[in-house]
Image: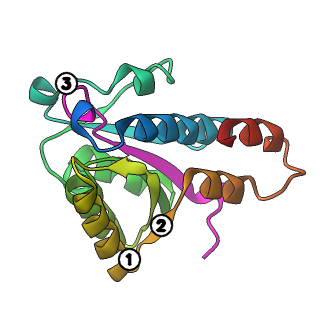
Amino acid sequence: MRIKRENCTGLVIDIQEKLYPIMAEKEALQTNCIKLLEGLSLLGIPTVFTQQYSKGLGETIQAISILYQSFIHIEKITFSCMDEPEYANYLEHSGKSNVLICGIESHVCVLQTALDLQEKGYHPVVISDCISSRNLTEKQIAMNRLNQEGIRISTVESILFELTRSAAATEFRAISKIVK
C-alpha cells in the first residue's frame, strides 16, 4: 500500500520530560522526531500529541513542543491512544486512514496504539527511528511484534520522500534539507 499525504495524520506519543531522559538512544530519537515533525508540518499533515499522566511524567519535551506555535496535547492515562475517547473521536472525524506514529515507549504505548489502530481498520505506520524504549531489547521485541502483526514500518527519510512522491514536488528541496 502506497502512503499518500492526503490520507495521513501524525501521532506523537508521550515524549515527556520524565520519560525522555531514560530512553535508549534518546539524542537520535529527538533528532529524528524533529525531522519527522518538520517534514509533516511542511507537507500539511495534521499531527496530534499525547501525554501520559502529565502530573507525574511532565510535559512534552520543549525541543518537540516548540515546533508548534499553538501546541496542544491530549491527556491520557491509558496505554493505547485509541482507548482515549478524545483521540479516537479526533481520528474518526479526521477522514484520515493512515496514522504515522512516533514516540515512547515502543513496547507499551506505541505497540498497543498501533495494534488497536489496525484492529479498528486504520493503517498505522510506525516510524522506527522515531520510537524508543528504556532499553533496546524492549524496542526490538516491539518491532518484532509489530512485524508479526503486519503493521507497516518506515523511517523518517523513507516516509517523508514517499509523502513527497517526486523531485518535482514544490516541497522536495525543503524535505531534502530536513532529512540530510
- Name which residue lies at 75% across and 42% down: 176
Instruction: Find out whether residue 15 is within the magenta segment.
Output: yes
For the residues bearing labels 3 and 2, Cβ distance under 8 angstroms: no
Rendering quarter of residue 35: top right
Instruction: State how far apart marks 3 and 2 are (Cα).
Output: 28 Å
- Name which residue lies at 76% across and 35% down: 174
Instruction: State how far apart marks 2 and 1 are (Cα).
Output: 8 Å
Q: What secondary structure is found at the residue carrying circle 1?
A: helix
Rendering quarter of residue 106: bottom left
Question: Earlier along the polypeptide chain: callout 1 or callout 3?
Answer: 3
**What amino acid type should be assigned to the residue bearing mark 3?**
Gly
- Name which residue lies at 27% across and 44% down: 86
Q: Nearer the viewer, residue 32 or 175?
A: 32
Q: Is residue 119 left or right of residue 56?
A: right
**Residue lying furthest left in this view?**
56
Please state the extent of the stretch shown in magenta in the rendering: 1-20
**What amino acid type should be assigned to the residue bearing mark 2?**
Ile
In the image, residue 61 sits, relative to residue 35, either above or below, namely above
- Name which residue lies at 69% across and 60% down: 162
Q: Which residue is mark 2?
A: 153
| Residue 55 position in % (x across, y down) | 11, 24
| Residue 33 position in % (x across, y down) | 47, 39
Instruction: State how far apart marks 1 and 3 are (Cα).
Output: 31 Å
For the residues bearing labels 2 and 1, Cβ distance under 8 angstroms: yes
Instruction: Find out whether residue 135 is within the magenta segment.
Output: no
Q: Which residue is mark 1?
A: 147
